[in-house]
Amino acid sequence: AAAEERRQAKAAKKVAAKEAKQAAKERLAAALKESQAVAELEERAGKPSADVRAPTCERPEPPGQLPLPLAESRTPGLASELVQCWAFACAFSGRLTLTKFSVDNFVAALCRPGHGSVLAELHVRLLRALLADTEQLRRAGQLPPPLDAGMVVQQLPPPGVVSAANWPEVLRAVLWLLPELHETEESRSALAALQRSDYPDLSVAHKLALLTPLTERCLSVETIRQELADNESRRKELARELREKQQALKRDEREAKADAVKAAAARRTLARSASPVPRELA
C-alpha cells in the first residue's frame, strides 16, 4: 500500500510539473502575442514602437530556414525552442537591459565554439533577474542539490555575483534547483552534460534544453511581471486612443457629409434665384 501511495504521489507530481511547464509556455505565448498587439496598436495610433520593430529583431521571413547544422536541424522541436528563446529575449530586452540580436546571430552563437558575447550576456541577464527575485524561487519550489555536487550549488548566489566570467558555474547551481529541469529525459540529459562538460562543448539541443526552462521561469520574476503589466496598461491606453480617434474620424465624416449637403442645397438655391424670369411672367 505504501509503495502504491508513493507511486501515485510521484505520478501526481509529474502531472503537476507538466501542467506548470505548459502554463509557463502559455504565459510566454500570451506575452509575445500581447507585445505584438501593442506594436500593432501603436502603429495604428500613430506611435510606432521602435523596440518591437527594431531591424535587429525582425522575425525571419516565411518560410525561412534557420542556419542550423544538419544533424541539429533534424531534432524535433529544436527550431521552435530556438525561436521561442530568441523572441523572449527580444520582447523583454528593455526590462532585462539586454542588447538585441538577430535570430541569425543567435543561431551562430549557439553553434560557435567557445564563450560568445551573445550567450554570455543573455545568460547573465536572465540569471540576475531570476536571482533578484528569490521569493519567486521559493514559491515555485526548489529541489535539493545532489550530495556529490560542489559547494557552488549548495546555495544560490546573489545576483551581483553573476558575471561574464562565472555565469556557467552559476547556471549549474541554479538549474540543479529548478524542478522543471528534472522532468524530461531531454532536460535531465542536458543537465548531466552541463555537470560533466564545459558549456561551449554542449550541443545546440542541450543548450536550448537548458535555456528554454530558464526563460520560462523568468516569466514569473517581478521585473518581467512588471513588464507584462506595463504592456497591458499601454495596450489599454492605445486601444482607448484608437477608439477616440476612430470616433473623431466618424464625427468628421458625418460633419463633412452634412456640410456637403448644405453646400449643395445652397448652390441649388443660388441657381434658382439667378435664373432669368420668363417673359410671360414679366
Image (spheres, grey):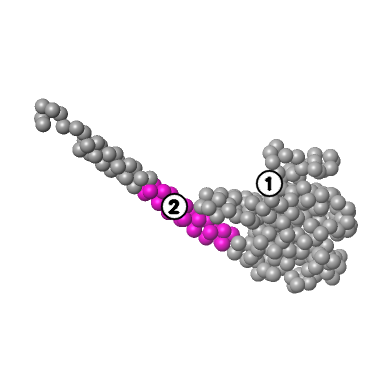
Q: Left or right of 276: which side holds 165?
A: right
Query: Which quadrant: the N terminus?
Result: bottom right
Residue range of the region highlighted in magenta in the rendering: 228-252
Q: In the rendered structure, which disc, 1 or 2, sits on the residue that comes first in sequence?
A: 1
Looking at the rendered structure, the secondary structure element under dot 1 is loop
Residues 70 and 171: in front is: 70
The extreme left residue here reads: 281
Identified by mark 1, the residue type is Arg
* Of marks 1 and 2, the one in the foreground: 2
Residues 148 and 53: in front is: 53
* Residue 4 in sight from this viewpoint: no
On the image, the x and y values in percent for residue 190 come to 81, 53
Mark 1 → mark 2, Cα distance in angstroms? 30 Å
Residues 273 and 249: in front is: 273
Identified by mark 2, the residue type is Lys
Indicate whether 65 appears above or below 232.
above
Q: Main secondary structure of the magenta part?
A: helix
Question: Which residue is drawn at the image coordinates 22% and 37% (left, top)?
Answer: 274
Question: Which residue is drawn at the image coordinates 60% and 62% (left, top)?
Answer: 227
Question: Is 239 covered by the magenta stretch?
Answer: yes
Label drawn at residue 74? none
Question: Which residue is drawn at the image coordinates 77% and 51% (left, top)?
Answer: 106
Reading the image, the residue beneath label 1 is 59
Looking at the rendered structure, the secondary structure element under dot 2 is helix
Reading the image, the residue beneath label 2 is 245
